Image (tube, grey):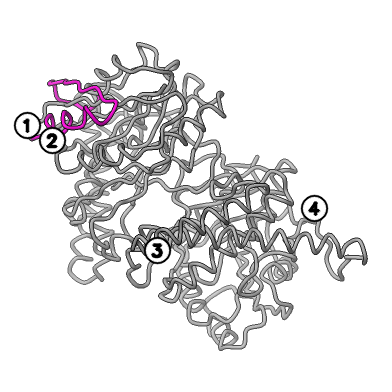
Amino acid sequence: MLTLLVATRDRAASLEATLTSLARLEQPRGGWRLVLVDNGSTDSTGGVAESFGSSLPLKYVHEPAAGKNSALNTGLEHIAGDLIVFTDDDVVPRPDWLRRIREAADRQTGFSIFGGPVLPKWESPPPPWILEWVPLGPTYTILHPCPEGPHRSARVYGPNMAVRESVFAEGYRFDERIGPRGRRSPMGSETELLLRLEKAGHKAWHCPRAVVYHVIRPEQLTEPWVLSRAFRFGRGMYRLQETTLQGPEFSLQGSKQTLPRELLSRSIAMQRSRLEGNPEQALEHRWHLRYHAGRAMEAACLMRDRVLEGSRDRARPGRPVT
Amino acid sequence: MLTVLIATHNGEKTLPRTLESFLDLEDPRGGWHVVIVDNGSVDSTPDIIDSFTARLPLTHLSEPRTGKNRALNAGLASVQGNLVVFTDDDVIADRRWLSSLRACADERPQYAIIGGPVLPKWPAPPDTWILNSVKLNAVFSVLDREDDGPHDPRLVFGPNMAIRRSVLQPEMRFDESMGPVGNRYAQGDETDLLIRLMQDGCEAWFCSKAVVRHIIRPHHLTEEWILQKGVHWARSQLILESRHPDVYDVGPLASPTSALWRLGPSLALQAARTLYSGAVGEPEHAFRERWKLSLLRGQSQALRSLIAAHQPAARPTLH
């Protein structure tokens, strides 16, 4: 038995496509159930979930508190089985997806984290500037297949990851202070948990054949969307780097000390490309500028938190973060 | 000092762009030098190479016997410095390509292999079916990863790989019985060498700032070319798995004759599905069925060559 855990919010249309593809999945050994956590949707999400009541082994739960990680933690209270698989509400898996993950988990008993490729499914043709200048991996959460075998946990991505139930039984939860919450919140919600697990000695395994497709919608092909993504990515990466000490070594990263210099040199390079009449090159610089702006924003937030921490107790009601 | 090594065969369409991108390169610490081995070109390639000798630190060699691996081995005799950087005659190097590789190699002395991203340089916006349904790494040697870190040597690609000269001992050479010949020149078979290095204990590091862009030609965006590439890819993949079963975790080897017999029904079934989806399916689905058929055809070619060579085979699986 395994549980598939999905958090959703106001995405009825793409959720319907995801649930339709889930209804076509091959059965993994021991069967499965789906826990769908509605994170305060105000659209027709409830109706969509209900319409799959008979075709999916579905449990529909609500978590009104905003935040994907809060929703996932709520979902963890409704799980069954020895393996918890995570995906998103804008993903279409291959029919053999769960079966492949189950097989890998059964064979690789020394590993507690499993991940697989996340490939793009473009709903409409991407404009050339996206293909040419935008880092596709972080922008659209794309991970190409790697050879089957041990893997670094930071390279397991949220739309296609599985963690053994025993890990959550130990008390591990998602950090509710990060992850998608609003339009400008930091990214990297699951990476934080995975890095904590890796630090505690849990190992990750890559299953190249357990494939999901990440649907890229037309509205994600606009410049404002791409740049806001860069900003959120910057925030998330800064937080990971600051809070886990062993964060992934992103080339985009740079250190805290060089942050002002990066911001300045990218601004200059952007203006120069604009003056030279090279708008696409300017866009590449703009992407990085927004990325570093996100890092600066997160640095400011963390500093503020530290100041506040001194003056008041930061303990929050609900589940503690291990 | 490092040496960039390129083998080229009739590269006139892309080599000028490659060498022009070299003119803008940021100098790596200790300097650099490029060795270009002309592998029996009958077009203007030799003249193109000569036209750059005044502007680049360039050595022009010639290896008339065809075979990319043969040309690379010939070039290895003329390298200088402690790092050999391999690339192809159809890339555009980022300005910081060599300086980044050098910096990664110097910062991580324990890694003998350094790889970097290979991004596609599209000739025109590709159709959506190509982006959604084509395995970009197998067909266009695309490798994108945004972070630095330890890396699987099998995922270091020919257009962007650096190897320390100290591990390229005289017996550590490209296998001249494999690799691209003639029209199939773009098909890299460097993986075999990387696996042998890996078995010797070498590890690879990924250096995400050292970017090259792989020039995709307009005719590469046709379905016919892509499917042909699928045949080649599946064939070399099965041969690699048969040569290195321990590295690929494919279980015990089988007799290639029995594997070929077992492949027969899969081929027939896939041919039927291809016909059916071609008649009634949506175009992207039909393409994927044709792609699977190409992979099976490549595997059957590999098995037949293993039978001819009296070598055991890994059991084919559909990738």
Please state the extent of the stretch shown in magenta in the rendering: B44-69
- Chain of residue at mark 3: A
Residue A263 seen in render: yes
- Chain of residue at mark 1: B
Same-chain status of marks 3 and 4: yes
Three-letter amino acid code at the position of disc 4: Glu
Three-letter amino acid code at the position of disc 1: Val
Q: Which residue is mark 3?
A: A274
Q: Is residue A75 left or right of residue A322?
A: left
Q: Which residue is mark 4?
A: A170
Residue B242 on the magenta segment: no
Label 1 to label 3, Cα distance in Å? 43 Å
Task: Give x and y (percent) for residue A6.
Answer: 60, 69
Residue B60 on the magenta segment: yes
Quadrant of the image for the N terminus of chain B? top left
- Chain of residue at mark 4: A
- Between marks 4 and 1 in the image, the one whose residue lies nearer the viewer: 1
Q: Which residue is mark 2?
A: B10
Label 2 to label 1, Cα distance in Å? 6 Å
* Residue found 21% across the figure and 25% down from its top: B37
Contact, mark 2 vs mark 1 (Cβ under 8 Å): yes
The numbered mark, 3 or 4, whose residue comes first in the sequence reads: 4
Label 2 to label 3, Cα distance in Å? 38 Å
